[in-house]
Image: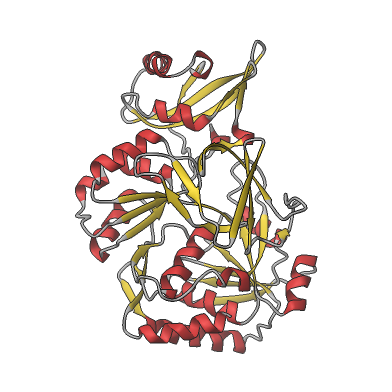
Amino acid sequence: MSGSIISRLAQFADAEAVVFGDTTVSYTQLLGLIDDWRAFLDDNGVRAGEVITLEGPYSPESCAGLLALIERDVMVVPLTTLPEAKRTEFLDVAEVETTVVLAADGTRTLRRTGRTATHELYGRLRAAGRPGLVLFSSGTTGRSKASVLDFVKVLGRYKEGGKARRILSFLSLDHIGGINTLLHTLCQGGTVVTTPERTPDTVFAAIEKHRVEVLPTTPTFLNMVLIAGSISRFTLDSLQLITYGTEPMPLRTLQRLKELLPQVRFKQTYGLSELGILPTKSRGDDTLWVKLGNSGFDHKIVDDVLWIRSDMAMLGYLNAPAPFDDDGYFNTQDVVETDGDWIHILGRRSEIINVGGEKVYPSEVESVLLEVENIAEATVTGRASHVTGMVVKATVQLVEDEDQRAVAKRVRRHCAAKLEAFKVPAVVEVSNARQHSDRFKKLRSAA
């Protein structure tokens, strides 16, 4: 299956395949890099079924390496550059047998760890002669979970015949979103644009320079774009579509983006490492209602929680029980409300704040907080209370320094005018600490 995808690339010949910084690689050159990887894997005796990392920047060499490793039928564990303690944790959980580290200049270093991977999920893939993909969750509220997917099923989602587009791959190859962008774009003969850094200005400079048409990203990053004022500093006439996912979008953020980029279509996406990226249809550019597609997916709602069944669902976790029911539906833990076939994702059940028996969804309060003057970013969590069990706590970052008491007073006054009393933050804290993960997803454990 991976070989068939690689064979498709030759038809696009001199078209641009991957852009990384100032380097542009054509499809012919990408195939040459894949050949280099094949020789490297042969020289180092890499065998089918090995558990092997691919560590380094999202570069043309990394893209070629991923395709060559899939073709080799290994269990590939893509990783970005990590703190040593986190890297050690991931290598242990994944039972990594071989590491391949790719330097910025393309130099490859392969080392054997001395481990033997014996997890039964690997055994199932080896017995079937299939490559595997191991992806770690962001672990924002605890230990990261390691999901194992059958890469043949993943590849089965990507077909020929679509429109070739220039897409900026915001998420790296260690995330299902980055994998999806790469495979989808290459199968259509499009161009994947990657950036060494992910700041608002570097991303929008790349959009301007490389005529990017599609930007898949996160609500947290888009809010950072608004704070930085990047939209006004770059020519963005090539940009046609912004997709957003991974967490609820504050409605005010979406509305402000639409005002600044009226020519751009906005689309909400939905996906999980455990299930893949679902086809979706947004109800409109200025609403948060979405319809989930059924091509390879099915869903149901039980007690207001979304459950999804996927043709490419993971086999399971390496380090946790898998929350599938007897019919193969996965518990996403996302609480939703419905309007016919349309759903509105309110947030994870674990993040709901129970105030005296009333439910508070953090994303609703955060959207209102972003309307308050001088607030750049807001994260809402619960704090224990002897009276109501929990109260709402808001941790905010400011655009400019200001007396915290004045900020708290303005926040409560604004929220009281927009929200029910139990949703108004009882605690308002000003902090300069980062409130998002490296994947630009809100980090509630830091609030």
What is the x, y in percent for residue 180?
49, 64
Q: Can you tell which quarter of the image residue 370 is in?
A: top left
Task: Name above or below for residue 199 compared with residue 166.
Answer: above
Disc tally is 0
- The residue shown at (38%, 57%) is 197
- The residue shown at (29%, 62%) is 212
What is the x, y in percent for residue 41?
59, 84
What is the x, y in percent for residue 431?
45, 29
> 362 left or right of 349?
left
Q: Residue most toward the top?
A: 387
Task: Name above or below for residue 420 compared with residue 282.
Answer: above
> 255 left or right of 91?
left
- The residue shown at (45%, 30%) is 366
Q: Can see residue 281?
A: yes
Q: Can you tell which quarter of the image residue 21 is in?
A: bottom left
Q: Nearer the viewer, residue 339 or 30?
A: 339
Q: Which of 403 and 52 is in front in this view?
A: 52
Q: Can you tell which quarter of the image residue 419 is in?
A: top left
Task: Name above or below for residue 8 compared with residue 325.
Answer: below
- The residue shown at (41%, 87%) is 10
Q: Quadrant of the N terminus?
A: bottom right
Q: Can see residue 114?
A: no
Task: Name above or below for residue 405 compared with residue 290.
Answer: above
Q: Which of 232 and 367 is in front in this view?
A: 367
What is the x, y in percent for residue 375?
36, 28
**What coloring was used for the rendering?**
secondary structure
